[in-house]
Image (spheres, rainbow, N blue to C red):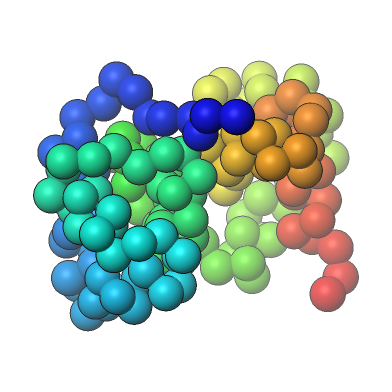
Amino acid sequence: MKPLQIQYFNHSVLATRLAKEVQSRAVTLDELSAATHIPSDSLNDFITGTQCPTLHQLATIASVVGLSPAWLAFGQGEAELPSVASARGEYASDLRLSPDELKAKYSFEHPLFNQATWINQVAAGIYLEGYWAWTAEQLRELNSPE
């Protein structure tokens, strides 16, 4: 299966955001490569804007640097991912919502669980339900006792 590519966005915007975040976190490309299992030369291509990451690569990079993939790629939503503790408190009321109610409340995407991550789980065969059903399940898992 061919990896899903991100289309219809400005590669230079992603490149600029990614370069700034890598630099501000004082992470070398080799360190980021080791953490993401993405070759350093590919990461360099993403930062220079000569190559576009797949959705899986984007989600992996964003997770490692603690950023929202939607913000990294498109500038949508908050840049930083909230901590589990703050997310539990802030979105606790979403637990009682059905997938349809979540969709009505947030319209496009839940602030914590972006569609890129859901697409990656579908592609990996981990989760096959619709986006809002997946989001409801992620909320339940977030709030389950550790």
Asked which quadrant contains residue 107, the reply is top right
Work out whether 141 lies above or below 108: below
User: Could you say which is closer to the camera, residue 19 or residue 44?
Assistant: 44
Q: Give the image location of residue 144, x and y in percent.
A: 85, 63
Q: Is residue 47 left or right of residue 123?
A: left
Q: Is 95 rendered above or below residue 104?
A: below
The reply, left or right, for residue 14 in relation to residue 124 is left
Q: Which residue is more in the foreground, 62 or 36?
A: 36
Q: Total label count? A: 0
Residue 91 on image: x %, y %? 66, 50
Can see residue 17? no
Q: Going 50% across and 45% down the picture, which residue do you hit?
A: 56
Q: Quadrant of the N terminus?
A: top right
Nearer-the-camera pick, 133 or 88: 133
Q: Residue at x 75, y 58 (%)?
A: 142
The answer to whether 119 is drawn above or below residue 140 in the figure is: above
Instruction: Name the quadrant containing residue 64.
Output: bottom left
Task: Find residue 139 and report its horizontal and vertical position in percent.
Answer: 75, 49
Q: Is residue 131 above or below residue 17?
A: above
Asked if residue 132 can be seen in this view, the reply is yes
Q: Residue at x 66, y 23 (%)?
A: 103
Pick the quarter of the image with the C terminus.
bottom right
Residue at x 35% of width, y 71% of height = 32
Which of 2 and 135 lies nearest the eye of the viewer? Answer: 2
